[in-house]
Image: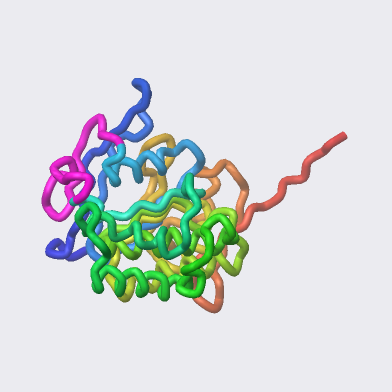
Amino acid sequence: MDGQSEILKVQNLSAAYNGNKVLCGISFNLSAGDFLVVAGPNGAGKSTLLRLLAALIKPLDGEITLFGKPLSSFSRRALSKKVALVFQGFSFPYDFTVSEIVSLGRTPFISRWMPLSREDLSLIREAMELTDTWKLRDRSFFALSAGERQRVILAKAFAQQPSILLLDEPATHLDIHHQVSVFNILSRINQQKRTTIICITHDLTLAAQYTDHFLFLSAGHIIAEGCAPNIIRKPLIEELFKTAVYVGTLPQTERPFIYPIRKNINYS
């Protein structure tokens, strides 16, 4: 990892809810263009980590440094120019058109009551074309399918032109076509824009087709971090998820894949 391009540094990070620790001693560094997948069982602390990185909650201990400055020193507006967050199942309380929702991604860059500039409009269109949502621009968000809604939310995040994109299960509840579509879009922005991506997902096989950098959490601790072929291995996956699995390598891509092994159960 090139120290000169390092943009995010997490040091000995801990967090707690109601006095109960949910993250403990988390440390890792990321550079521009990194694509990190965070995985682990339910309750491992994955979503809490994203909330810490988005400054939605404060850490109990440790420090997060963004571009060499403490994350706590950024105003909400300044941070929104650097970091975009997409939670799973994100929705809106009011009915907006697709273009209105994507336009909200430019909010940190414009003064109150000021109209969108030509640059803003250009970036909004670019984000919508990247996510294949330009054709939906006049549609009601509520009238869209789950896959279309997810692409619109991604377009809104891309319109922010973030240096870091935080994603919590971006392909959940989507069919295979839309899952692949979402990860193709993420891969494109990661490679073309050098956007640093931190993505929570339970689909290790799909994620491993797009990145090699994985971080596994369990009970608030980092269990393993490294290259997918090195850490996506049967003993670790079975210990992490308490499930028998088969781990192999796809001959077309030489990347790992996982599927669970059914145990015979006597129902009598």
Q: Is residue 109 left or right of residue 88?
A: left
Identity of the residue drawn at 13% across and 43% down: 73
Q: Is residue 207 visible?
A: no
**Residue at left 41%, top 71%?**
128
The span picked out in magenta is 57-77
Decide: is 181 above or below 143: below
On the image, the x and y values in percent for residue 79 come to 22, 50
Residue 58 is one of the magenta-drawn residues: yes
Q: Position of residue 210 (x, y in %)?
A: 44, 68
Q: Identify the residue shown where x is 60% and y is 61%.
A: 145
Q: Name which residue lies at 47% across and 48% down.
A: 92
Kindly indicate the quadrant of the structure image that contains residue 1.
bottom left
Residue reaching furthest to the right: 268
Q: On screen, 191 above or below 38?
A: below
User: Which quarter shows the C terminus?
Assistant: top right
Residue 39 in the image, given as x and y percentages of width and height = 45, 49
* Magenta highlight on residue 33: no
Q: Is residue 158 visible?
A: yes
Picture layout, residue 161 above or below residue 40? below
Q: Position of residue 206 (x, y in %)?
A: 52, 63
Q: How is the image coloured?
A: rainbow
Q: Is residue 243 left or right of residue 224?
A: right
User: Up-down: is 126 above or below 204?
Assistant: below
Q: Say which of 230 and 67 sits in front.
A: 67
- Image side of residue 81 versus residue 16, left or right: left
